[in-house]
Image (cartoon, rainbow, N blue to C red):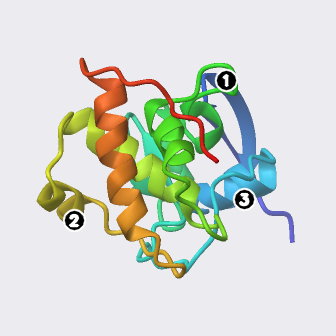
Amino acid sequence: MNVQKQQITLTVNGADHQIALEDTNTPLLWVLRDYLGIMGTKFGCGKAACGACTLHVDKEAVRSCTYPARLAEGKQITTIEGLGSREEPHPVQRAWMAEVVPQCGYCQPGFMMAAAALLEKVPEPTDADIDQNITNICRCGTYYRMRKAIHRAAAIGGTREEPLAETP
């Protein structure tokens, strides 16, 4: 049986990629990982419940495990690899390091992407804003440190610039 592949173009972290897919409903997560080798976005539940697969599509937080790749065509996709760089980490990445948030770290890319999307909309979130918008799941339970990191990222990214403190 000869299956016709469909070409789609995805813009990921500023670079265009031509991809031939048998099914354009393939979740964006698997296109990134299996076709493009971009591994920072993690698989968690496959049901858009845990948030490990969170990335940005046109600056909106999206759970990529259920987001059809075809819907991302013509849009800007940002993964954790494109959020910042080693030389210039995003304020969320700086805050995550300063607050020593991760334990196992598996869910952290999704949390950081969700936090960055929140801060785009709500530059100085309250605890209630964080609770309402950050619905990802962390099995290690680092929620307290994540909340502190989100507040710190707001300070770093806003007008209250604070230096990245050295961690012990």
Disc 3 and disc 2: Cα gap in Å?
39 Å
Q: Position of residue 145 (x, y in %)?
A: 42, 61
Image quadrant of residue 134? bottom left
Residue 73 appears in the figure = no
Q: Amino acid at mark 3?
A: Glu
Disc 1 and disc 2: Cα gap in Å?
33 Å
Q: Residue at x 62, y 58 (%)?
A: 29
Q: Considering the numbered disc 3 on the image, is that residue within a helix, a strand or a loop? A: loop
From the image, tell me which residue sits under label 1: 15
Q: Quadrant of the N terminus?
A: bottom right
Q: Amino acid at mark 1?
A: Ala
Q: Nearer the viewer, residue 24 or 135?
A: 135
Label 3 vs label 2, nearer the camera: 2
Residue 131 is labelled as: 2
Label 1 vs label 3, nearer the camera: 1
Q: Position of residue 47 (x, y in %)?
A: 47, 79
From the image, tell me which residue sits under label 3: 22
Residue density around tag 2, few if under 14, some if 14–19, many if 20 or more, within 10 Å: few
